[in-house]
Image: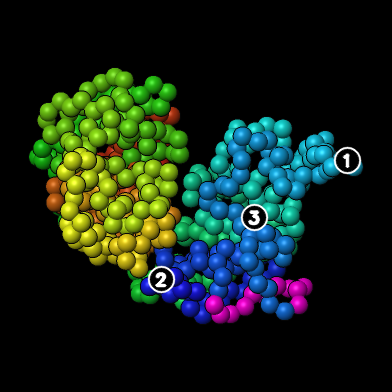
Amino acid sequence: MTFPGVKALDGVDLTLRKGEIHALMGENGAGKSTLIKCLTGINDFEAGEIRIDGIDGPVKNHSTLDAQKVGISTVYQEVNLCPNLSVAENLYIGREPKTFIGTIDRKKMYRKAEELVKRLEIDVDVYQNLENYSLAIQQMIAIARAVDMDCKVLILDEPTSSLDDVEVDKLFVMMNQLKQNGVSIVFVTHFLEQVYAVCDRITVLRNGTFVGEYPVDELPRVKLVAAMMGKDFDDLASIKPEGFDTLKDAPMQIEAQGLSHKGTIKPFDLNLRKGEVIGLTGLLGSGRSELARVIYGADKAQTGTLKVAGKEAKINQPIDAMQMGMGLLPDDRKAEGIIGDLSVRENIILALQAKRGMFHLIPRAQQEKMADHYIKMLQIKTASRETPIKQLSGGNQQKVILGRWLATDPDFLILDEPTRGIDVGTKTEIQKLIIHLAQEGKSIMFISSEIEEMLRTCNRMAVLRDGAKVGELEGELTQERVMSAIAGGFDE
């Protein structure tokens, strides 16, 4: 399978047994998404074949409908359903039961929907609109729809990246139930602990090639990471240089006092010195992103004051923040980050061009030089600087957005989930980059759902709960201290 300038798949094998959960692992750009698209008829492949038990001869899917007819269904990270329709309507859209005169038999549809969610132990009212339920429930409805279409193979592509621990556990219960019923599941994730919690076997891809297939209990985590990266790698190694935490004499970069935004974040105080990395931690929905948005002006502060480099700042919108040397990498790269139809080059220069204004266009030669610099610096895998960003893998799209903000040379950089959905090797690259930027004197606010990576990179951590900043942790940061603080038991 090739794209212009890139061989996306080369001799890849995947063997899926009946009633197993099989992890498909690899770094961004390894070929996971391309393989899924070949299986589901989105992409044609140039060599090889697909064989399914019970079907004579090779299977060639030319569309997702073809794939569904032979029993292959996919549920993606972004749920592809209609939130304004009821749960039942989403379950049966396009295949509604009909009356003898050809109209939709709504009574039968809702009865079948209730039977289906009861069988799969999904606690929902099928008459309610889908938008009334959490993302986790919406994904379960998408899975229920696939199961009701008699799928033999269910592909789950990063289904847990936006879920909290309780929601992940509910999803795993459902996956195990489907496994017991003989459904084979391909599970794509970047969370290693989830692989070892729920999977039976692992297939590893690297640079579009097949590395190996392993039973989970015969592949320790370190060896899995080594297989994905092609080298040995200690995921828990400290990357903080000596003396990184001694910043008490550094000048203040950000001083927020009493900032708030009605309905999202209660008044908070927060100081950040030059060269410091502060982590925002708390459960999903605790207000981490909302706090960052208030400082940046994406949500206008309704109370309080903000000083930037010692001077009082009036930030009414993000362009004001940009002019004061701030940058924000948002947590939702698809909705708020990339512009899919623009090239890698255009996406990289976007923020700098906005900061300079429409009447000071960046010369084309300078754009190309800048794009090449960040493609090389961040090791962005792309056929060229002119490749549309939508053709890149999710992790490489994230690197492009990071390059966009680095191009503005910010003094204060807010990174909201910069490593979500990114492979282990790229995560470490970004963590090292954060520390490097801090050593250059930049101030970093780092938001992550993974406590371990913040422990590796942060000088200090602010803890949020229910839209309020409830405390800070500094000194020796440990997972136990952070978890205790999130739960409400500060040990100071």
Label pair 1/3, CB-CB below 8 angstroms:
no
- Tell me if 211 is positioned left or right of 480 in this view: right
Q: Is residue 130 above or below residue 421?
A: above
Say whether residue 137 is left or right of residue 331. right
Q: Check disc 3 and give the amino acid type.
A: Met
Task: Report the residue at 18% width, 27% height from top.
Answer: 313
Q: Residues within 10 Å of mark 3 (few under 14, many from 20)?
A: many
Check disc 2: other Cα within 10 Å, few if <14, some if 14-19, many if 20+.
Answer: few
Q: Is residue 214 left or right of residue 396?
A: right
Q: Earlier in the sequence, mark 2 or mark 3?
A: 2
Q: Quadrant of the C terminus?
A: top left
Q: Earlier in the sequence, mark 2 or mark 1?
A: 2
Please give the name of the residue rendered at 38% of the width and 57% of the height, measured from the top-left corner: 389
**Amino acid type, callout 1:** Ile
Compute the Cα span from label 2 to label 3: 37 Å
Could you tell me residue 475's position as x and y percent? 24, 43
> Is residue 460 shown to the viewer in this render?
no
Q: Which mark is residue 4?
A: 2
Q: Residue 75 lies in what quarter of the image?
A: bottom right
Q: Label 3, on which residue? A: 175
Q: Secondary structure at mark 3?
A: helix
Question: Magenta residues?
Answer: 46-56
Q: Please give left or right for residue 150 compared with residue 321 in the image.
A: right
**Could you say where residue 111 lies in the image, as x and y percent from the top left?**
81, 39
